Amino acid sequence: MIKAQNLIRDFGPRRAVDGVSFEVGKGTVLGFLGPNGAGKTTTIRMVSGFLPPSSGTVFVKGIDVAVDPVSAQKSIGYMPETTPLYEDMTVSGFLKFIAEVRGFSGAERNSRVDRAIERCFLGPVRNQGIDTLSKGYRQRTCLAQTLLHDPDILLLDEPTEGLDPNQKQVVREMIREMASERVVMLSTHVLEEVEAICTRAIIISGGKVVADDTPARLKTRSTKYNAVTLRAEGGGVAETLGKLPAVEKVQVLEDGRVVVFPKAGKSIAAEILATAQEKKWTVSDIKVDEGRLDDVFRQITATEDTKKKEAA
Ligand SMILES: Nc1ncnc2c1ncn2[C@@H]1O[C@H](COP(=O)(O)OP(=O)(O)OP(=O)(O)O)[C@@H](O)[C@H]1O
Ligand SMILES: [Mg+2]
């Protein structure tokens, strides 16, 4: 559905996107993550055909976006980061206008507008002027606009930004539901959203792809992955556990619990339990850490920043 090859985009002397490549097939919800200024929006704009790359190519369903943007854009619904809306139109007036631009008229146009209004829960504000909408409703109007032509590819730049928790949930469910027959590529800073809806995550930092994997596999890169936290009554708990061959380090928390970090790729829970039994410790409160995406995000993107500082 989308094939991006070695995308580069310079703004004057600044390289915003530096050799980004990826391929995405049907049924994927691709989360695009990265610190502010990493190049997410710039990449999405290039995929949408809105911004020409300095070099590199984007194919959308086999069409080179730079060669034939209009054909490519027929398959794309794009929700930009800044919600561009016509302030003096009403919600339904705006959606009708966009539907017409997309080539629909008469009853077909109206039913598409009604469907988009329904899907994005815009019923209560359909006749309200866009200039008087709250931020969340503006966001949803912009999302509704992307759905009018029922595109195969949705490019959503921070789609849940500014929505209340209920609406976040609604939009996430909508995205998940739509993705089965389509591709959704979204950027977000909300890592729980990535875990909740994305089947794949690309982390971009300094314009480069620094990770590309499923959220579950990314979490295993966390230093906390498989770490065991436990409360154990008995003698020399931290010292004993620190000496186990698969243990990297042990940390004693203020409340007396002990956190045991495994060496990379090791699993230590069974060994810890066996040791506790052998030493006759009383163990309570034991849990194995699944790893956290925000830790991985920080590990990966901080490393890149540090590298840059070292180079400078
Ligand atoms: N039109 C432009 N002219 C000059 N520089 C630009 C332009 N658009 C983006 N940039 C620069 O390119 C870099 C990447 O910006 P981009 O908007 O893609 O980041 P982002 O990952 O979307 O960040 P955020 O999380 O803040 O939305 C930034 O350094 C930004 O200042
Ligand atoms: Mg952005």
Image (cartoon, grey):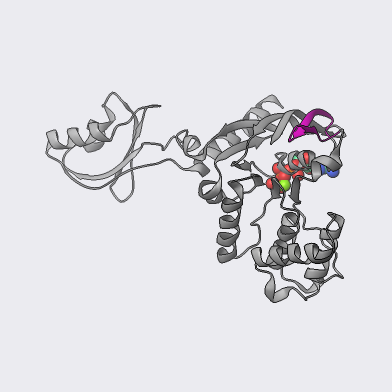
Of residues 249 and 154, the one drawn nearer to the viewer in this rendering: 154
Query: In the picture, which quadrant includes the N terminus?
Result: top right
**Residue 49 in view (yes/no):** no
Residue 220 place in picture, x, y as percent: 44, 34
- 17 up-or-down from 93: above or below: above
- 120 up-or-down from 158: above or below: below
Taking the image as shown, residue 152 lies to the left or right of residue 257, namely right
Q: Is 295 one of the magenta-colored residues?
A: no
Task: Locate residue 287: give its quadrant.
Answer: top left
- 150 up-or-down from 309: above or below: below
Q: Which residues are magenta?
A: 53-66
Residue 300 place in picture, x, y as percent: 57, 34
Task: Locate residue 235: give its quadrant.
Answer: top left
Query: In the picture, which quadrant includes the C terminus?
Result: top right
Residue 41 place in picture, x, y as percent: 74, 44
**Residue 176 in view (yes/no):** yes
